Structure formats: C-alpha cells, structure tokens
C-alpha cells in the first residue's frame, strides 16, 4: 500500500497528465482507499500550493495558459441556463466558475470548468437527475461567471451574444 505522500504524488502526476476531470471515486478505486481520503489528499495538495480545481465531474489541474479571462454578470431563469452555457461555448468561451453574492455568507463560488458541449450535457444531466438547485436561484437569477477565451475581442463577442439573448445583466 502506498503512503499518503506517494499517493498524493501520483494523484498530482495524473492530474497534470490530462485535461479531463478525474473524480475522487476514480482515485479511490485505483488506490483502494475511501473517497473521503482522496478528498483529504486533494485538500492537502491545494494547501501546499497546487492549483487543483473541483468541477462537477472531477478534479482538474489548472495549467497556466496564455488565455484571456473576464467576468460577466448574467441574469436568467433555470430554464435559460442551457442557452447561456451553450452560447458561451459556441462563441469560443469556457465557463470556469459561477459566483453569487449571498446575504449571509458573502460570495459563494462554484467551480464549473465547462469547456465543450459534452461537458454541458453532463452538467445538465447531473442538475436534472440529482434534483439540485442552482446557486443563481439564491439571488433571483443574478450571478457572475468567470470566462476564459482566446482574447479580449472574443470576450466582447461573447458578451454581445449574451446581451442579444437577454441573459447579460443590465442595470435598470
């Protein structure tokens, strides 16, 4: 059996070697430990400075890239979520996260890391089958997404498409 240090080293190496999310259950089965042990391993790796994010379908190592990131404020109903996500992806963006301003806890951020339509389909399936609630439901649909794209011009196009769809939040 591997020591914790050896297991964490292998987890890091596997995350570095792929751009696909790897779940805690995947690692737990591989190393014959509990899912909670893996969650703890990931927490220790993060605490040591590793840039590992948790998406809805597993963990990703955030590779530094020459990409533009920007934030958009959106407002929509749960029924419009798919339109929003697919519009961003169709115009060359990636949806890194969602943030809402909660009256008790302050900012709450959920990692999404949606980079293609297949990931959106899986996310929507999880949303529907788990009878989950969206963070944006806490704030009447208002939320912020961090988006990644090639450059500022592409980000501007995405914002324009969101505005045309009535999803980009506009102050009254």
Image (cartoon, rainbow, N blue to C red):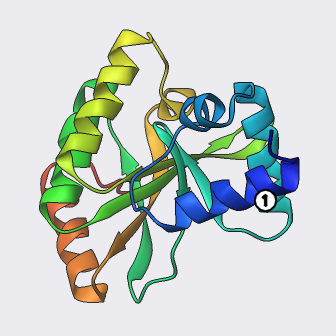
Q: Who's the residue at 16% across and 53% down the image?
A: 87
Q: Give the SS element for disc 1.
A: helix
Splitting the image into 4 quarters, where does residue 148 fall?
bottom left
Q: How many marks?
A: 1
Image quadrant holding the N terminus, namely top right
Q: Is residue 43 left or right of residue 96?
A: right
Q: Nearer the viewer, residue 91 or 159?
A: 91
In the image, is residue 106 above or below residue 51?
above
Along the line of sight, the residue nearer the viewer: 103 or 91? 91
Q: Nearer the viewer, residue 17 or 105?
A: 17
Identified at 73% across, 61% down, the residue is: 9
Check disc 1: other Cα within 10 Å, few if <14, some if 14-19, many if 20+: some
Residue located at (59% from left, 35% from top): 30
Residue 99 percent location from the top left of the image: 57, 49
Comparing 161 with 118, the one in front is 118
Q: Is residue 105 left or right of residue 10?
A: right
Drawn side of residue 149 relative to residue 41, left or right: left
Q: Residue beneath label 1, please?
A: 45
Asked if residue 5 can be seen in this view, the reply is yes
- 84 over 48 or under it: above or below: above
Residue that extends furthest to the front in the rendered view of this protein: 1
Residue 54 spot, x, y in % from top left: 59, 47
């Amino acid at each position: 059996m591997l020591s914790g240090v050896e297991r964490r080293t292998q987890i890091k190496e596997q995350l570095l070697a792929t751009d696909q999310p790897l779940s805690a259950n995947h690692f737990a089965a591989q190393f014959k430990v509990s899912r909670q042990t893996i969650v703890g391993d990931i927490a220790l790796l993060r605490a040591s400075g590793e840039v590992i994010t948790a998406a809805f379908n597993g963990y990703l190592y955030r590779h530094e890239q020459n990409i533009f990131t920007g934030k958009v404020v959106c407002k929509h109903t749960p029924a419009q979520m798919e339109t929003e996500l697919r519009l961003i992806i169709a115009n060359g963006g990636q949806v890194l996260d969602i943030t809402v301003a909660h009256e008790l806890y302050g900012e709450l951020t959920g990692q999404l890391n949606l980079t293609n339509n297949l990931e959106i389909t899986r996310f929507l399936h999880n949303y529907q089958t788990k009878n989950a609630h969206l963070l944006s439901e806490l704030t009447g649909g208002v939320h912020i997404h961090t988006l990644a794209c090639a450059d500022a011009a592409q980000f501007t196009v995405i914002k324009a498409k969101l505005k045309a769809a009535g999803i980009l939040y506009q102050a009254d």
